[in-house]
Amino acid sequence: MAALAVALVAGCLVGIAKWAGTLILPLSWSALGLVLLFASAYGAFAYGIDRFVHARLKLLYRTVHDLRRTRKGDDRIELKGDVLGRVNAEVSAWASERRTEIRELQEREEFRREFIGNLAHELKTPIFNIQGYILTLLEGGLEDEKVNRDFLQRASNGVDRLMKIVEDLDLITKLESGVMDLRTTRMDLHDLVKDTIENMEILAQGRNFKLVNDLEPGTVVMADRNRLAQVFTNLFTNAINYGRDGGRCTVRSYGLEDRVVVEVSDDGIGISPEHLPRLFERFYRVGKSRARNEGGSGLGLAIVKHIIDVHGGSITVKSTEGQGSTFSFTLERAM
């Protein structure tokens, strides 16, 4: 259009010169000149627009690919074929990656806020309890022999819970960072579960709860005995605390190629499906039915998952409300 406008202006000037009688060249030569002028103007404008578009496309390519010039003149980019189509596809892919990154950052920020809120809540409960007991003692309870020892014991229990939370957080941090070295040895899984059940006998008897070792003697795996004992202790503790009076929890296993699959099943209240994906998160609680109890840190299942992870295994959970839950994890079979 710009070239046509230039040609029309020139044609008008020729017409005016013809009408005024000042036209020097013959009309046929003037017409040829107009055609050449139109062609030249069209070529000049087309070249200028092409250079302008290519310059912008090069800039867009550098933005998408984060290209850097390594030497003088090394900024030439091959632009052939459906350039705009390729650019549009790559810009769309780039925008999709950025959206994914932004979404992941938002999810991490939400998790961080929730984690800090949960941690503050877990710490606040024992701190407030300790503070209340100490204030009561300072305001006269210390002189009352019927009160002072009882309140001091309760304050001591609150301190123990705080220490438990801090120790569990420290353990998870070490497991995640790989600072903690596992002392992996050949060990009999049946014997380990037997010893763990004996250590928890008093807690189980308090609720008439039965822990059953259904593992075959000689089930040998490669694991850190102390850490694996902690896995069973945490799973048994949850089964007892959140199970029904007179319930039971059974440990079984079966072989799967070079792995051993261990199942810890209880017949407790179960867990609703919407809670299962987040069950191994730190401080995650499953509704009112799993309210905070005085002795727990809220990190038991998170620790279980991290211990199984550092052993090179995986853990899953299946549960039906009103029927119980089954935690399954894998360990390396000892050859």
Image (tube, rainbow, N blue to C red):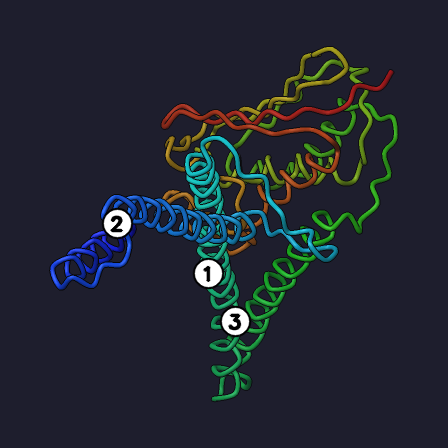
Left or right: where 254 falls relative to 158: right
Badge nearest the viewer, 3 or 1? 1
CA distance for labels 3 and 2: 106 Å
Report the residue at 48% width, 70% height from top. Answer: 129
Q: Quadrant of residue 307?
A: top right
The residue furthest bottom is 139
| Picture mark count | 3
Depicted 245 relative to depicted 284: above or below:
above
For the point 16% across and 61% down, the residue is 21
- Front residue of 154 and 84: 84
Please tell me the numbered disc located at residue 104.
Answer: none
Disc 3 or 2, which lies upstream in sequence? 2
Q: Nearer the viewer, residue 323 or 318?
A: 318
> Eyeballing the image, is 226 above or below 113?
above
In the picture, measured across the screen, residue 200 lies left or right of residue 216, that is left
Residue 188 rendering spot, x and y as whole percentages: 82, 23
Q: Are the residues at dot 2 and dot 1 in contact (C-beta closer than 8 Å)? A: no
Q: Residue furthest left?
A: 19
Q: Amino acid at mark 2?
A: Pro
Residue 120 x %, y %:
49, 66
Is disc 1 surrounded by few (<14), some (14 to 19) or many (20+) residues within 10 Å?
few
Residue under label 2 = 26
- How far is disc 3 from disc 1 in space, using C-alphas? 21 Å
Circle 1 SS class: helix
Q: Which residue is mark 1?
A: 113
Tell me, yes or no, if residue 196 can be seen here.
Answer: yes
Of the numbered discs 2 and 1, the one sitting upstream in the chain is 2
Q: Which residue is mark 3?
A: 127
Foreground disc of the pair 2, 1: 2
Number of residues whose C-alpha sits closer than 10 Å to that of mark 2, classed few (under 14), some (14–19) or many (20 or more): few
